[in-house]
Image (spheres, rainbow, N blue to C red):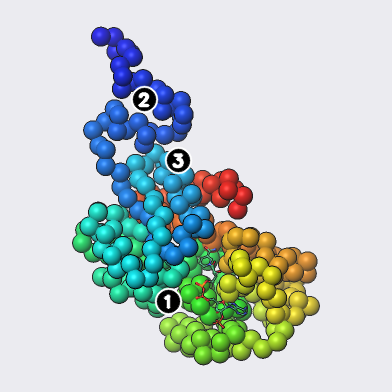
Amino acid sequence: MADNAPTPSRLIDAKRSAKNKNSVIRTKGVLGSDFLSRLTGSFSTGAASNPTVWMIEAAYRFHKLDWRYINCEVNPENLKFAVHGAKAMGWIGFNCSMPHKIKVIDFLDDLSDSARIIGAVNTVVISGSRLLGENTDGKGFLKSLDAVRPVKGAKALIFGAGGAARAVAIEIALAGCKELHVVNRDPGRGERLAELVSSCTSTKTCFSPWLGRFQIPDDIDIVINCTSIGLPPRVDVDFQVDTSTLLPRMTVADVIANPANTKFLQSARDRGCTVLDGRGMLVNQACIAFKLWTGHEPNSEVFKAALAEIAL
Ligand SMILES: NC(=O)c1ccc[n+]([C@@H]2O[C@H](COP(=O)([O-])OP(=O)(O)OC[C@H]3O[C@@H](n4cnc5c(N)ncnc54)[C@H](OP(=O)(O)O)[C@@H]3O)[C@@H](O)[C@H]2O)c1
């Protein structure tokens, strides 16, 4: 038989290649002998609105890796079984999103230093029989902030004291933020975050309860919304800040990725501030997880293009 004779395998291969020129993954099982993909994924409640699967699968295809990312709806009572299941099935790792970022720690063997301080995990790496928890939220935010302005020596103000705020506060403090002002509606939670940052880092911290329209002190360099205001269904919640205190020299960031242009960011843009939306954080935390699992440095443009495809 001629080398290029149209065998059934080659015909299937040609058809699949025509469908997706970049894909070697889809043809590997036909021509090769390895039918076992590497598995990763995500466990959350409300998984249907989580776009991470779209970015990471696009990156696996782009980098020609026979890997999969499976977005799973997991209720709190089933988290333990999902984690044990992933381990039993030889998964390489998984993300945890709301509401599992704290509870998942009960099922892990070890934590990275920052995940231990933050007290929450969004990425797990399974290595042999051991599960290591990492938190990439704050690192992802820091990388996108770094592209706009340095945090070292800066004075920052964070609205919020939940999981995202803890991750961002710890990472910017570890990166050399000089002073951090925490503002939160629940004073107990806010005070605990300010105490955590000052006990674990050399950043000078203070806390203010969020009462009425907050006035940003004029020596602040970076203002960050780490609350869930701006995320549906809280899109129209009034962000209680005196926008006249947002100065053009300030960098104003929001962790909300969808919609990216929150009302708060729009007010800051209108005031002439440099603004940073939550998409960079979303892309970067996914890139960090990709590297932790695969060992490959991903092309972040692929992640951004995947988000743009779904109009994010
Ligand atoms: N872009 C990304 O990659 C990325 C990554 C992680 C998270 N996020 C986003 O970050 C947001 C926060 O997540 P999280 O895990 O920190 O949630 P969380 O733990 O539930 O914390 C929510 C925070 O928002 C505050 N808040 C909510 N509604 C408020 C209101 N009406 N007025 C004032 N404060 C209000 C809460 O204040 P109290 O303490 O007073 O209740 C708390 O500080 C989410 O919307 C998520 O989408 C984005």
Residue at 51% x, 45% y is 302
Residue at image mark 1 = 118
User: Percent from the top left, x then y, of residue 212?
Assistant: 70, 87
User: Percent from the top left, x then y, of residue 10?
Assistant: 33, 20
Q: Amino acid type of disc 2?
A: Asp
Left or right of residue 149, residue 42 in this image = left
Residue at 31% x, 22% y is 9
Rendered view: 47 above or below 210:
above
Would you say the residues marked 3 and 1 are in contact, meaning their CB atoms lie under 8 Å apart? no
3 or 2: tag closer to the N-terminus: 2
Could you tell me how far apart the alpha carbons at marks 3 and 1 are, in whole angstroms? 33 Å
Q: Secondary structure at mark 3?
A: helix
Mark 1 Cβ inside 8 Å of ligand 1:
no
Rendered view: 108 above or below 261:
below
Q: Nearer the viewer, residue 59 or 295?
A: 59
Rendered view: 168 above or below 261:
below
Residue at 35% x, 31% y is 27
Q: Which mark is residue 184?
A: none
Q: Which mark is residue 62?
A: 3
Q: Amino acid type of disc 1?
A: Ile
3 or 1: tag closer to the N-terminus: 3
Could you tell me how far apart the alpha carbons at marks 2 and 1 are, in whole angstroms? 48 Å
Q: Which mark is residue 13?
A: 2
Would you say the residues marked 2 and 1 are in contact, meaning their CB atoms lie under 8 Å apart? no
What quarter of the picture does the N terminus occupy? top left
Q: Nearer the viewer, residue 81 or 134?
A: 81
